[in-house]
Image (spheres, rainbow, N blue to C red):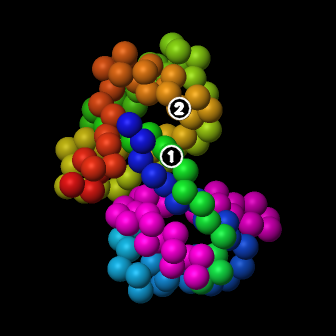
Amino acid sequence: MKVRQLSVFLENKVGRLAKVTQLLGAANVNIRALSVADTHDFGILRLIVDDVEAAEKCLREGKIVCRINNVTVVAVDNRPGGLAKVLCALNAANINIEYMYAIAEPKSERPLIVFRFSEGERAVAALRNGGVEIISEKELFG
């Protein structure tokens, strides 16, 4: 199961992140998760939003470079070793994690983690074989 993520290219300048959030807010798009990775000159903002098409449209209209790609969201047991279970299932299948970040969901009993893999289908199979719950986009936004 895949969840669509919006990756946004940002110049490393004051106000760029604020502009993105203002555009999304004006388009009535809710941000459910985000991650920012930066270098000296630019950053990549990764977003899970409730309406990815509307988000992409408003950002492009606002002259913001972005693209949609697929990630995998999994539920992690909220106990010591919960994340280790997920990572060990991937390690056993020799799956490389390109990046990961958490979804802040205070109502959930189990934390949700977003992953991007070099081999997505193999990773999903390894997670399922490891007994890890994979969350669909429909389940995420109910």
Q: Tell me the distance, in whole angstroms, between the alpha carbons under discs 2 and 1.
A: 9 Å
**Mark number displayed over residue 114:** none
Mark identifier at residue 120: 2
Image position, residue 11 (x, y; %) = 73, 73
Q: The magenta stretch spans which residues?
A: 32-61
The residue under label 2 is which amino acid type? Gly
Q: Secondary structure at mark 1?
A: strand
Q: Residue at x 20, y 44 (%)?
A: 109
Graded by Cα atoms within 10 Å as few (under 14), some (14 to 19) or many (20 or more), the crowding at tag 2 reads some
Q: Is residue 44 magenta?
A: yes
Question: In which quadrant of the rendered view does residue 141 lie?
Answer: bottom left
Q: Does 24 sit left or right of 9 as displayed?
A: left
Of 23 and 44, the residue lying toward us: 23
Give the residue at mark 1. Answer: 70
Question: How many numbered dots are placed on residues in this image?
Answer: 2
Farthest residue to the right: give it: 41
Q: Residue at x 41, y 82 (%)?
A: 27
| Quadrant showing the N terminus | top left
The secondary element bearing badge 2 is classed as helix
Tag 2 near tag 1, CB within 8 Å: yes
Quadrant location, the C terminus: bottom left
Q: Quadrant of residue 64?
A: bottom right
Looking at marks 2 and 1 on the same chain, the residue that comes earlier in the sequence is marked by 1
Q: Looking at the picture, does residue 125 appear above or below residue 39?
A: above
In screen coordinates, is 66 left or right of 29? Answer: right
Q: Is residue 82 visible?
A: yes
Residue 23 place in picture, x, y as percent: 49, 83
Q: Position of residue 53 (x, y in %)?
A: 45, 66
What type is the residue that disc 1 sits on? Asn
